[in-house]
Image (cartoon, helix red, strand yellow):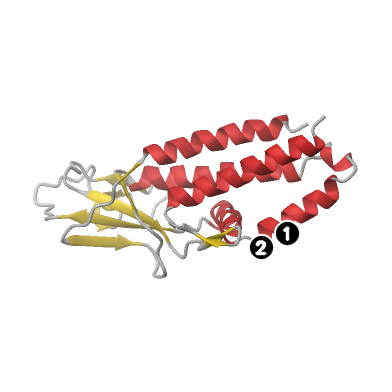
Amino acid sequence: MFEGAMVKLQDARTALDRLRASVKPPQVTNIRIISGPPGLRGDPVGIDDPVAFSETFSSCVAQIRSVGDAVLKNRLASKINGFRDWRARKTDECKNDNLLKFINDRRNEDLHNAVRRLSFTMHACAFSNENARAPSPGASFWMDGTGPYWIEYQGTPSERRIPYEPREGYVFTVAIITPPTTHRGKPLASSDPVTVCTLAEQYYAELLSEARSKFGR
């Protein structure tokens, strides 16, 4: 009955494991360069690679949210007595929960509008691009909260961002801009990206377990 949802849950847990493996204790130094729109920022975590973290976070959110879709939009289950009323209650619960609404909105923003809800900060003690060599003629040098990088073929269909090497000596932190603050009626102890995704995965895992117990055949 809910075999597809079980597969999506395993995908979500794999994505969450990747997200957890990418973080380390945050660090603060005397030079900080922030990248991201203004707004309230959540608790930061330390990372090594902002680009990889952004992709992993987006994947994690999408995979977690798809578990809910696989459960609540199950066509076979919708034919079982009581499922539609249960689904309506759970749908309202998700809509009214601050953290679950964030996950849903974040998935839709990323999928439809390419909006990023993460703010990155590069931390360093000193910086110099004196020995930097352009990867190709005309490449321009840039630096923001995700680190120093080159832009090749700017303004063309072939435009590409290439990280500046070496990157040793730089550390990064990432936080959610305007993060959720409550879940299941209680304040969040932390609003860092990993905590938010972990709580969402736990909710949808419990949702699937309840659905299988009540309606699984």
- Position of 181 compared to 95: left or right? left
Give the amino acid type for the residue marked by disc 2 in the picture: Asn
- The residue tagged 1 is 92
Q: Which residue is more in the foreground, 104 or 164?
A: 104
Residue 123 at least partly seen = yes
Q: Where is residue 64, by image quadrant?
A: top right
Q: Which residue is more in the foreground, 186 or 169?
A: 186
Circle number at residue 96: 2
Q: Secondary structure at mark 1?
A: helix
Residue 138 at least partly seen = no
Q: Secondary structure at mark 2?
A: helix
Q: Picture coordinates of residue 33 (x, y %)?
A: 25, 61
Q: Picture coordinates of residue 58 (x, y %)?
A: 49, 47
Task: Say few, some or many: other residues with alpha carbon within 10 Å of mark 1 (under 14 / 14 to 19 / 20 or more).
Answer: few
Q: Are marks 1 and 2 in contact (CB under 8 Å)?
A: yes
Q: Residue furthest front?
A: 186
**Quadrant location of the N terminus?**
top right
Check the image and report above or below for 176 versus 133. Answer: below
**Quadrant location of the C terminus?**
top right
Check the image and report above or below for 43 versus 171. Answer: below
Give the amino acid type for the residue marked by disc 1 in the picture: Asp
In this figure, what is the number of numbered marks? Answer: 2
- Position of 161 compared to 204: left or right? left
Taking the spot 24% from the left edge, 43% from the top edge, the residue there is 136
Q: Where is residue 127, by image quadrant?
A: bottom left
